[in-house]
Amino acid sequence: MLESDFKYIIDTFFTLFSMVLIIFMVPGFAMLEAGLVRTKNVTSVLTINVMIYAVASMAFLLIGYDLAFSSWENDSISKWAAFMFQMAFVGKTINIMSGGVSERVRIIPLAIFAVFMGGIIYPSVVNISWGADFLDATILDINMYDLAGSTVIHSTGGWALLAAIITMGPRRGRYINGKIRVIPASNIPLVVLGAFLLWIGWFGFNGGSVGSISSVENANLVAKTIMNTNTAGLAGAIIAGSLMYVRYKLFDITMVLNGALGGLVAVTAGPDLYDIYTPIIIGLIGGALVVFAVPLFDKIQLDDPVGALSVHLVNGIWGTLAVGIFVEKISFLNQLKGVLVVGFFVFFVSFIVLFLINKISTFRAEDDAQLEGMDVNECGVEAYPEFKRAI
């Protein structure tokens, strides 16, 4: 066997294995969100996660991949493996949205938006960052370093979520006379399971984005990338738990897990570039940002049941800028430009698309439907039919 053939086979297998790990994040998001919403909305959340994965992936197959990369040809790995790896990312952008609009979103309009996200919005962001770059040599050519998508994926989903929350408004009864009504999670074990599925999936997310493992140098780089990814998650969990205990003398497991996820999002832009200590700083700041951002979004009445804005949008921005701060060869201004260009594009395009879809099929369920539960009104199947529904 030729050495080139061997490398082709090994890197193709590595890409497919990484893709499988990333797909594990689909049940990760589903379990996390199912545990954080009330029991009367669990089936709806699960259905949404399945449908948007299917719809966004199909849109990427039919439209988005060509828009992002211009060509299917690939000399280093199977072109089918390259597509599957990129397709695995697509659903994450809309998964980020699904949790943040849960308990009041209707399935059909969100599925329609998933077509636009998988077919146009996300591929356009990929094009100007990882792909064919139709804006090359223009003032909007961003030249941003973002290994696995702190901005390209996480902030993209976060900006779209922000547009959706503004369009839809809060859940029924979430804010009463300017005060926040606490709505507790329904199933903490599911939250923990979902968060750790996401954590494990991140190793394929970031490690697979190195692109090759078929040489000693690349194998070491993949291993360091995965190690740094894990380190940032650990640091995010530790700081979030510590801050919650200092403030409330209690450990909030949901905040600890979101702190870990915040650290993972933050390190995603450059885990291959850092030494083994820098991810500790990035994760600590990322976890702390989650703790402070969650109540801030509530204060301005942006209702996000799972903390997705704090985890993905805030830390997507922080993680992208961190590369420009901690890596000498990377321009901070280029990183900032990338954040601003992507943010402006995704938010305003998403807002326009959401506005138009909302005119045809309303995103927000009526208050009576929210009271009864989205399971009954959207799915006809309750996840816990023997339980008394929480209002």
Image: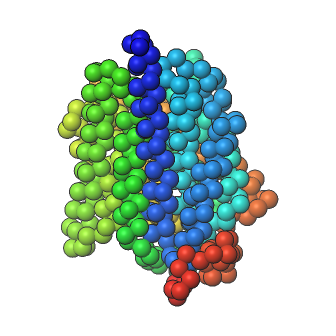
Residue drawn at x 33%, y 56% as measured from the top left: 259
Above or below for 77 versus 244: above
Residue drawn at x 30%, y 49% as measured from the top left: 233
Residue drawn at x 38%, y 71% as measured from the top left: 188
Please tell me which residue lies in front, 280 or 292: 280
Indicate the quadrant containing the N terminus: top left, top right, bottom left or bottom right: top left
Q: Quadrant of residue 273?
A: top left
**x and y percent of residue 189 in the render?**
37, 69
Above or below for 383 versus 145: below
Horizontal side of residue 99 vs 47, given as left or right? left
Colour scheme in use: rainbow
Please tell me which residue lies in front, 20 or 152: 20
Indicate the quadrant containing the C terminus: top left, top right, bottom left or bottom right: bottom right
**x and y percent of residue 119 in the render?**
67, 40
Above or below for 279 versus 254: above
Horizontal side of residue 21 vs 47, given as left or right? left
Residue placed furthest toward the top: 2
Please tell me which residue lies in front, 84 or 195: 84
Please tell me which residue lies in front, 263 or 5: 5
Q: Is residue 97 visible?
A: yes
**x and y percent of residue 107 in the render?**
67, 63
Q: Quadrant of residue 125?
A: top right
**x and y percent of residue 27 in the render?**
48, 57
